[in-house]
Amino acid sequence: MISGIMFLVIACISTSGWCSKIVYPWRSTTAIVKTGETFEVWFDADNGQTVNSIELKGPYNTVGTTFSVVTGDWEYDPLSGNRYNTRLKVTVPASAPADRYDLILKTTNGDALSSGAVKVVHQFKNDYYIMHFSDGHFYQNGHDTNTLMARKTAMIDIANIMDCEIIIETGDNMYNVRNHPEREDEYFLGIESDGIKGMSNANAATFLVPGDHDAHTANDWPQATVKVNSNFFNDYWGLQNHSFKYGNGRFMMLNNAWGVSKTSGKDHQYQTDDAISWLDGVGSGGNFFLTAGHVYDKMHEFINAEEPLDLVLAGDKHHVRNDNPFPFDDNSVEIAYIAASIRDHFEYNLFKVNNAKGTYIPVSGPTSVVSVLKSGNQDDRSTWESNLTIAYQSANDGSVSVNSATLVNHYNFSIEGAKVRFVVPKGLAYRVINGIITQEFDGDAFHIVDVRVDLGANSTTVVAIETGDLCPDDPDKETLGLCGCGVAEGTCPPLTLTVNSGSGDGDFLPFEQVIIIADTAPKGQEFDTWVINSGSPSIAFPVKHSTTMTVGSEPAEITATYKDLPKVNGATFVSQQIPALLQGETVTVSFTMKNTGTKIWTKDNHYLGSQSPQDNEIWG
């Protein structure tokens, strides 16, 4: 009897990590959800196993949810044939703090856990960062894996300071996990005793795709069948392809590392078909389109044929990042960025996306490559000095009520919306110096204050938090609350906010936080600033298209204003076709140029434009 039980347990572990499991969101995927909205969970339950409740467990708090259940039989990977039988629709409370959470299903058979599975946001940022790295090759012979993991840890630390919303990893992640499943825990949970962070320790939503070495046998995909490789990846990493949304962005993760060609997706063609179908359905309405795969020039073009891509992310080629960007197909635009391998380098790629416009910039310059180190030997952790650091004056563990954080940015570019989190005792009123509070909440044991601060290039910035009576003349209040000092909460009338050329107007309490968003700029213009027409509102960032504000002590009226786009000449050479010719012969030649300047043009201003169709005014 005992041996029979032992055999059952071993069989479950060897085939799928455990008998029942969360299929999505898990490891290779993260669910991104706004407060008050829903996300799906795919769960493969044991016979008779039911879900009693669902919790989101954050670093400092626990959030209860409501959910609905549908049972059935769904295939989630046609190459492995793997399936799940329970689909959960989970609603996040409107009051939930923004954070990254573990997903915990409380079931009749115990807890099912997916670490770092859910990123909860209050709103989608108008400008957000994407970090991209690749090719860690952890546990490859001849390389010090702890040093490689420490390199990724330093990147996660930087992403957390920048408050990146998304991290994408493009394959060749780790070797020989089939014989060492504990390595997966290290990869996603870290090694606390050695200061190593896992992917679930990032504040960003994280996603990864397979590489050619993320395979079942000898870390080499050709040595096993596509079914065996797919089943292996499902068991240890999760979904091998996935599409998701962030605001107006549409992101499609692909496995293009196993036996595909430049002209055919072969067994993996279904992934591009799925992505195109998703863009026509749930993913419709976007303005920014990104694909990611291990290889830069395979399968992306099939999606591009249906929906022109804006950005392609890839790995595989360890050393070519300084030649970014590349064409992802013959004669395509050059929008493919390849990340340096973590195994050989200490760099990442960084992009900033504008949600309203659907545009992006490579933050560091044309190649998007960013070095982690200001100084030091990349192979000797004791010598590392990072280009971006945060240091607290006192322990940031909830034991002190007065603290400060010093942020040092050695990069030659500014960082918009860096994040400082203060962990302080409950039961006190706090104010912040040199930053904007984006949220504060009571956690299970401590009070949490999250602060936004913009960092200049090559700058040092100090953000402080302290206790204090913000209403010294009001014996009944120490904080402003929603009504302000001298007014009992619940007794103040709402005040009218009028927003011209934007959204957010309505009736609000005096110190209620309001999100205002400017309308899309008229043709040939861009957002300039918010102007106060009347009243005494407080606008957090007047020069931001989307920001927060409070109405103040009287009705207020504000207006979004716009300015003409700066006109910039510029084009780069792409290709030419010149046939062989004889002296004196007249032939037709063709040149292809790519616009790098202003897209809106008029003939009288001498800007290069397109006359196909006639009188077309936009090109690019």
Image (cartoon, rainbow, N blue to C red):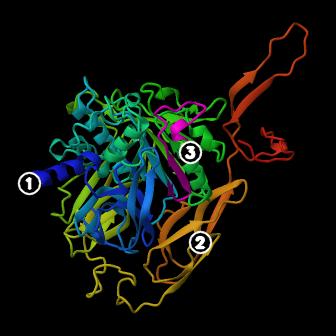
Front-lying residue, 17 or 366: 17
Reading the chain from its start, which is encountered first: label 2 or label 3?
3
Q: Is residue 224 above or below residue 362?
A: above
201 over 378 or under it: above or below: below
Q: Earlier in the sequence, mark 1 or mark 2?
A: 1
Disc 3 and disc 1: Cα gap in Å? 48 Å
Q: What residue is pinned by disc 1? A: 2
Q: Are marks 3 and 1 in contact (CB under 8 Å)?
A: no
Instruction: Tell me the quadrant of the picture where the N terminus can be found.
Output: bottom left
Q: Would you name the residue on which mark 3 appears?
A: 272
Residue 216: percent from the left, percent from the top?
Answer: 33, 35
Magenta stretch: residue 603 in it? no
**Secondary structure state at the residue bearing disc 3:** helix
Query: Does residue 451 show up?
Result: no
Name the kind of residue labelled 2 in the image. Answer: Ser
549 lies above or below 155: below
Q: Amino acid at mark 1?
A: Ile
Kind of residue sitting beneath label 3: Thr
Instruction: Determine whether the residue tagged by mark 2 lies in a helix, strand or loop.
Output: strand
Query: Magenta region: which residues?
Result: 244-269
